[in-house]
Image (cartoon, rainbow, N blue to C red):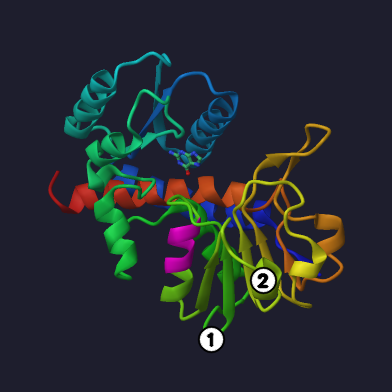
Amino acid sequence: MKRIDGREISEYIKTQVRAEVETLKAGGVFPCLAVIIVGDDPASRTYVNNKKKVCEQVGIRSLEFALPAATAQEDLLSLIRKLNADDSVTGILCQLPLPKTIEEKVVLNAIDPKKDVDAFHPVNVGHIMIGDPVLLPCTPAGVMEMLRYEGIDPSGKNCVVIGRSNIVGKPMAMLLMAADGTVTVCHSKTVDLVSITSQADILVSSVGKAKFVTADMVKPGAVVIDVGMNRDENGKLCGDVDFTAVQEKAGYLTPVPGGVGLMTVAMLMKNTVTAAKMQMTKGK
Ligand code: GUN
């Protein structure tokens, strides 16, 4: 089994981004990411801190807008409108989940698609759906970079995605399909999951349950990509895959931590550069 090293691959991406940022800055373009966090969810706080840290590593300016959990939807929307109109802000990210009192869909629709570095706006989702992506969905794009780096071509392969979320499962299926994979999407209502996953040449799990993917679900030699971010019974960070058992059977496997999570943030940086360039060429 080859362990796919998210650290190495994300560093490779970040090196490219750092060089592009330098070039942009030399030309008077300063990428700047506005990160909005509403409430005090500890996992969201960790993710946001990490995004800001990586911005610094690649030379991108970041601004944090931390709003209380009781923030009214209209106040959040007016902040987004202000950031949309601010030419010095080239990327806007609103950390999810939002408090129950706020409608996620309304908020994501309010972000200017040109600044939507998560690619969650329906306009960007549409671009992904028709195979003409402008800004890429960060986690699925990170997975595709891992496959490319390892020389794994999804063309003609059986690709199985477990999970159908808007953030991971659905866009992951779109990118694999765009790469000519034969894609099956499984979810909580899937009957006889094992019979489907055990046919997979490339298996992507984004379920959110520790040890969900067991060795019997994996085809010998398969590429197994673990998008899960869970805590095990001892509170330790782990993915969806039972790593110890599956490593005996898989051909390639991504660890957690040290896998896809690092790629997500690296791809966010790449999108932030793409967004800044788009605003430059559109004469903004
Ligand atoms: N919450 C979990 N994953 C993500 C992500 O990729 N982007 C944002 N904005 N929130 C998230």
* Left or right relative to 81: residue 181: right
Residue situated furthest bottom in the rendering: 156
User: Dot 2 corresponds to which residue?
Assistant: 197
Residue at disc 1, secondary structure: loop
Which residue: 83% across, 71% down? 249
- Crowding at dot 2, Cα within 10 Å, few <14 / some 14-19 / many 20+, comes out as many
Q: Give the residues drawn in magenta, as a range.
A: 169-174
Q: Quadrant of the C terminus?
A: top left
Q: Is residue 170 shown in magenta?
A: yes
| Mark 1: amino acid | Gly
Percent position of residue 245, x then y: 86, 61
Comes first in the chain, label 1 or label 2: 1
Q: Which of labels 1 and 2 is toward the front?
A: 2
Magenta region, mostly helix, strand or loop? helix
Residue depicted at x 39% and y 57% = 136
- Residue 94 in picture, x, y percent from top left: 38, 33
Query: In which quadrant of the rendered image does the N terminus lie?
Result: bottom right
Q: Position of residue 156 (x, y in %)?
A: 53, 86
Instruction: Count neighbours of disc 1 (C-alpha within 10 A) and say few if under 14, some if 14 to 19, many if 20 or more.
Output: few
Looking at this view, is 12 or 105 the one in front? 105
